[in-house]
Amino acid sequence: MHIFEKNIKDLDLHIPDMAMPIANYVPYKIFDKILYVSGQAPVKEGSLIYK
C-alpha cells in the first residue's frame, strides 16, 4: 500500500469511483503552460453540489 493510500484510509476518506464519460471529448488540454480539464464538476452521490 502506498503512503497516500494509507493516509486516505487513516483519515477515513472515501474516494468515489470515476463517472463514465457520456460523450467523446478530450479529457485535458495544455495551452501556454495552463492545464484545462474538461468534464469535471462538483458532484456528490450523483448530484451537483453547487449550481
Image (tube, rainbow, N blue to C red):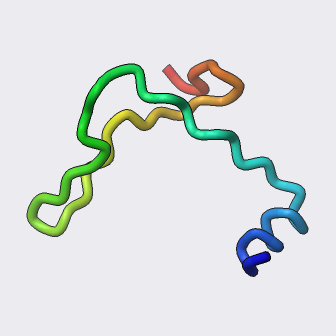
Residue drawn at x 71%, y 74% is 4
Residue drawn at x 54%, y 25% is 50
- 12 lies left or right of 48: right
Residue 6 is situated, as x and y percent measured from the top left of the image, at 82, 73
**Name of the residue lying farthest toward the bottom:** 3
Residue drawn at x 16%, y 68% is 33
Give the number of marks: 0
Which quadrant would the N terminus be assigned to in this image? bottom right
Observer-nearest of 46 and 51: 46
Residue 3 is situated, as x and y percent measured from the top left of the image, at 75, 80
- 12 lies left or right of 7: right
Residue drawn at x 57%, y 39% is 18
- 51 lies left or right of 1: left
Residue 31 is situated, as x and y percent measured from the top left of the image, at 12, 59
Above or below, 38 relative to 22: below
Residue 34 is situated, as x and y percent measured from the top left of the image, at 20, 62
**Name of the residue lying farthest toward the left:** 32
- 6 lies left or right of 33: right
Above or below, 50 relative to 10: above
Above or below, 46 relative to 33: above
